[in-house]
Amino acid sequence: MGSLQIDVLGASFAIQANEDSAYLKKLLDYYKRIAEQIEESGSLQNSLQVAILTGITLCDELYKEKSKKQQIAQQLTSDDDSEAERLTIEMIKKIDRALG
């Protein structure tokens, strides 16, 4: 169980989670990097807007990665099915020749 002191976008609080403290720190550092990039764009008026857009940006990254993973899994399944079909046809031909 890990703990983390969060100081970001004018908010400060502590959390405890079922993850290692070092891992929580990595997450916070990544969140801060994204928030800083959004703040530097200068298009938002306050910390709440930055926090919301940061969350949406991170959700977008996660969704894209999950979609990519799903596409890869589908492609692998499709390739496996194609290979199984090819091998089956090849075995049927060999059996036909042996019996023929």
Image (tube, rainbow, N blue to C red):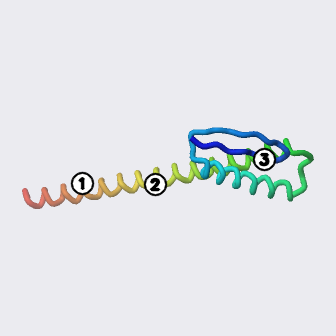
> Which kind of residue does numbered mark 3 sit on?
Asp
Image point (86%, 58%), residue name: 41
How far apart marks 2 and 3 lie (CA) works out to 43 Å
How far apart marks 2 and 1 lie (CA) works out to 20 Å
Q: Nearer the viewer, mark 2 or mark 3?
A: 3
Disc marking residue 75 = 2
> Which kind of residue does numbered mark 1 sit on?
Thr
Question: Residue 42's x, y, as percent?
Answer: 90, 56
Image point (61%, 39%), residue name: 17
- Residue pushed farthest left? 99
Residue 10 located left or right of residue 85: right
Residue occupied by mark 1: 88
* Front residue of 65 and 82: 65
For label 3, count other residues whose C-alpha is less than 10 Å away and answer few (under 14), some (14-19) or many (20+): few
Evaluate if marks 2 and 3 touch, with contact meaning CB atoms under 8 Å apart: no
Residue 69 located left or right of residue 17: left
* 80 to 51, vertically: above or below: below
* 90 to 11, vertically: above or below: below
Sooner in the amino-acid sequence: mark 3 or mark 1: 3
Image point (52%, 52%), residue name: 69
Dividing the image into 4 quarters, which one contains the N terminus?
Answer: top right
Question: Residue 59's x, y, as percent?
Answer: 68, 46
Residue occupied by mark 3: 7
Q: Quadrant of residue 36?
A: bottom right
Q: Nearer the viewer, mark 2 or mark 1?
A: 2
Sooner in the amino-acid sequence: mark 2 or mark 1: 2
For label 1, count other residues whose C-alpha is less than 10 Å away and answer few (under 14), some (14-19) or many (20+): few
